[in-house]
Image (spheres, rainbow, N blue to C red):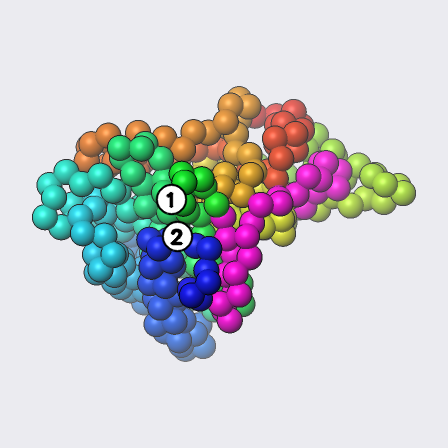
Amino acid sequence: MKPDSLIPDLAANIANSVKAMMLEIRPRLEYAALSGKRSEHENLRHSDNFLSDFDLWMHQRYKEEIAKHVRSFVYASEEADPEVIGPDPDPDLCVLVDPLDTSELAVRGLYGYTHIMVYSRSLARPIVSVIGDIFHHIQLYIGARDAQGVDRAFMVTADSTEYVLDRPSQASLSQALVTNYLMRPDTRFVSLAQQRDFLAALSAPSAGDKKKGRIGVDFGSVSLCHVAAGMTDATVEFAKGFAIWDLAPGHYILHAAGGAVIDLHGRPIPLDYGFHSLADIGAAMDPRQKFIAAGSASLADEILKSLRV
């Protein structure tokens, strides 16, 4: 980060580690894409997910990198059971990591993201979140709790230009770009296609009788970051649900930017993930959360009313 950066120190240190990690992994992924050598493994933990050497390498490297900035922590990675790192047997901080999100696309050189969230068990909430975009000029989305206890959100480009994120979209549904992780044909795309009322509301004419609503594809935590930045208006997940490492890091960034994240009953999803013990952290890795994330509570409510779930 630059000397005059507004980003708090721990978040800046984590962000620099993420940026360095992306610099290391990017040429390896480019080679995999061009050579077709994707280094796929059987995924014993998540049988329907893609797993490669690159996921496992980043899993190990993050453990080493985070230890440079945090003396003791619980390391909760998608690729292994939670473990305590450092001399404190019961540390306050839990570091939640998805080392390489959308890895089946990353090894094709298309999209690749990496997620880190630092959670304070004593505060029962996140204090840092960093999502890295491996292949694009906009590289980092950051959420951080500052010295005054205020949550703030930022975006950082490859040339280290920083932007404060505090103006998510206020669009109505008929004017909105709404995204969904619709890539799995049977479990997700079909479910989306069956939401006829939602698609009709999104296709309704708005100002000047133009149909401005759009549906798009997006991925994991970065989809909530795009809402935080105002690039998209909302993202929805009503089919399978997101695992905690896919939802929580982006949830915190969108919260810090002023957006809304609700469940399919209309209730705000809390930032308290119940990480009271190592057993609780392990148990939190399994459930999936269905949600609506939007730039405003009114748009989230409008989407919810149009869904049949």
**Is 29 positioned to the left or the right of 265 in the image?**
left
User: Few, some or many C-alpha atoms within 10 Å of disc 2 (few <14, some 14-19, many ≥20)?
Assistant: some
Span of residues in magenta: 153-181
Q: Residue at x 34, y 66 (%)?
A: 21
Question: Residue 171: within the magenta?
Answer: yes
Q: Judging from the image, what secondary structure is the residue with disc 1 in?
A: loop
Q: Which residue is mark 1?
A: 147
Q: Which residue is mark 2?
A: 8
Quadrant where the image shows the N terminus: bottom left
Whether residue 25 is visible to the viewer of this picture, yes or no, is: no
Three-letter code, disc 1 = Ala
Question: Residue 72: within the magenta?
Answer: no
Q: Position of residue 163 (x, y in %)?
A: 55, 57
Three-letter code, disc 2 = Pro
Towards the viewer: 181 or 193: 181
**Is 94 positioned to the left or the right of 8 in the image?**
left
Mark toward the start of the polypeptide (1 vs 2): 2
Q: Residue at x 21, y 44 (%)?
A: 74
Q: Residue at x 81, y 44 (%)?
A: 211
**Is 263 positioned to the left or the right of 275 in the image?**
right
